[in-house]
Image (spheres, coloured by chain):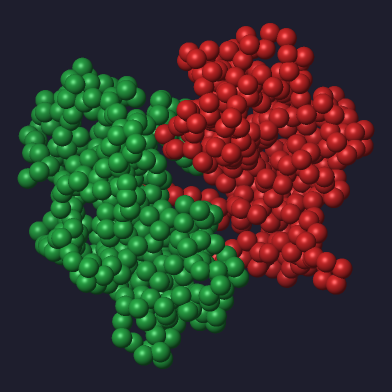
Chain colours: A red, B green
Amino acid sequence: MTLQTSPTVQSTAAPAGPALDVRKLTKRFDIGNVLKPKLVHALTDATFTVNRGEVVALVGESGSGKSTTARLISRLIEPTSGEIYLHGKNVLKSEPGVASLAYRRAIQMIFQDPYGSLNPAMTIGAHIERPIGIHRGGRNAKEAVVDLLATVGFNPPAEFAAKYPYQLSGGQRQRVAIARALAVEPEIILADEPVSMLDVSIRMGILNLIEQLKEERGIGFLYITHDLASARYIGDRTIVMYAGHQVECAESTELMDRPAHPYTKLLLSAVPNPEAGLVTGDDEARGEIPSLINQAPGCPFAPRCPHVMDVCRKAMPAVTQLSQDHWVRCHLHS
Amino acid sequence: MTEQPILDIQNLYVEYLTPRGPAQAVNNVSFSIGAGEVFGLAGESGCGKSTIAHSILRVLRPPAVITGGQIRFRGQEVLEMGDDAIEAFRWRGAAMVFQSAMNSLNPVITVGEQVMDVLETHTKMASAERRARAEELFEIVGIENKRLTSFPHQMSGGMRQRVVIAIALALNPALLIMDEPTTALDVVVQKDILRQIRRIKEKMGFSILFITHDVSLMVEISDRMGIMYAGEIVELAKSKEIFNNPIHPYTQGLLSSFPSVTGQKRKLSGIPGTPPDLISPPNGCKFHPRCSKCQPIETECAPRLTEVLPGHWVAAHAGMPLPQIAAGGSRTADQ
């Protein structure tokens, strides 16, 4: 991996750098009223890059800001602050408000629920033809549909093009969603928990398809998941998120072998481990993700952290570079 | 097992009567759960594991019908119980924690009242006793007493799940049925709750029927487990044994569907294809269209659950090329 993953280094990246470059992306949702202001700090200072031909895994529990990150990048919602660069171009500046067709073509998204993301009244073929019509002028759409369906593993593809979503299983629907995203030849695909609603035996098929698309077509993926094992399986790099903050980032195997942040360690210890069984010793950190409303200063993990120090409750730790592609935000390491 | 099992299911059949014809949701399933044992049923959606759980408490609704078999609880036939007997059996004999349990709490009543409600319906306890018992139950599942007056929306998902477990434990059931109790929870909370369940079980000594699709989780929590596919148990053994020495190709496929966070990265294949339509399932072994090790005989006639190693049962054909069968001789499951 040649990419610089540190946020501090990234900010000096040349325009010819990574395909997608996100800097200090922050989203606060205002859910209060004039008398009782309330801010949900959904995402704070998200900074990372996704290159072509790379899978970046974003791991965290519910409410950690993973999906908010994907929604901000896909520009379904507007960030409170921060920048998104596509090939060095600051897209929030150059195309404020609504994203351009070119941007939407470059960045595609796959959603968690393949039962909700397809229109029950449209055939599979129509789902894939539509983006081709919008983005590519619709030339040779029929052949393209058959090609795409074959790419994502339908056999015979032409037959499936005439089917309706209800005739397909969950795994097949997710393949349709992937084919639809591929239809516009995107550079980056944001995959928001693409396998968590699927049966276990067919999950690997979808993950292997993502890996294959990365290798054969050079597509970059932002793979969002709560499952560390699958992040390690297809993620080249893994970013761990907690309560809207990115707390640790490293090459995936390195992260799982040598986790530095106490939260990463906690997550790893919670992964079912058939060999060790349920170790009923002292529980490490306990409790649950804190409220994201009107957050206290300091590290968000401090209330649960077994190594908490005074400084942790006062200031959010800065990024510490542990090695070339491993950084952590924790006072233990600064 | 030498002593009498808490629960003994023999040759259970359940069908869903659909407009397209009957779907065989549970097909000739037999297993038993010993005292203090954690028995797991693992399999994908639609394999019949929840249907079995609902059959035990007789809470199946039409179009589901139990078409055959016996369910014995401490030797007593559940399927023949009268209204009074089944009422007494539910909650005292066996209690259930449902999959969407977190959302099964009434949003406009405090959680404490919901615990006491069960006690009021099923016991003759006085009001003060009920309160004391509710406090005790909250302590058991690890929630502070002052949360008795909380409403469900004031609690996190993990806490609500603990409340539901407390409600299930209210009458000291001999068997706790847990249908995917932690699926909707985050991993850290899940681990916390599973440890707690294990600890409570050691203390109170009930048996657990644990249902999940996550085989690695199942190996962690259960003593013995059955792997289900398309309404049938295809492999049944001690959990560690299934993990270390899976014999049925479906079990092997299922285990190779879970990547690991440690060790060498290796390519995992999962299982090609999709589970069959239960209205018109394939002939012979129901797994054969997806199986890479399929023998010609398996497309024709169905295999039977056979004990290939002591305590290790696999759906197999006599004379199948399993070294264990040749060495150990075979018995059929019906004995």
Picture residue at 69% right of the left edge, 22% below the top: A130
**In the rendered view, does B34 fall on the left or right side of B213?**
left
Which quadrant of the rendered structure holds the N terminus of chain B? bottom left
Q: Residue furthest front?
A: B19
**In the rendered view, does B112 fall on the left or right side of B45?**
right
Is residue B94 placed above or below B131 in the rendered structure?
above
**In the rendered view, does B58 fall on the left or right side of B6?**
right
Picture residue at 71% right of the left edge, 18% below the top: A132
Residue B147 percent coordinates (x, y): 54, 78
Residue A169 percent coordinates (x, y): 46, 31
Q: Nearer the viewer, residue B135 or A234?
A: B135
Q: Nearer the viewer, residue B34 or A165?
A: A165
Q: Nearer the viewer, residue A6 or B50?
A: B50
Residue A161 percent coordinates (x, y): 55, 18
**In the rendered view, does B25 fall on the left or right side of A303?**
left
Residue A317 visible from this viewpoint: no
Question: How many numbered marks, from 0 up?
Answer: 0
Q: Nearer the viewer, residue B243 or B304?
A: B304
Is residue B208 placed above or below A232 in the rendered structure?
below
Picture residue at 78% right of the left edge, 56% below the top: A29
State the image quarter where residue B151 is shown.
Answer: bottom right
Is residue B92 placed above or below B50 in the rendered structure?
below
Which quadrant of the rendered structure holds the C terminus of chain B? top left
State the image quarter where residue A78 is shown.
Answer: top right
Residue B120 visible from this viewpoint: yes
Is residue A45 placed above or below A204 in the rendered structure?
below
Picture residue at 68% right of the left edge, 30% below the top: A189
Residue A255 percent coordinates (x, y): 60, 43
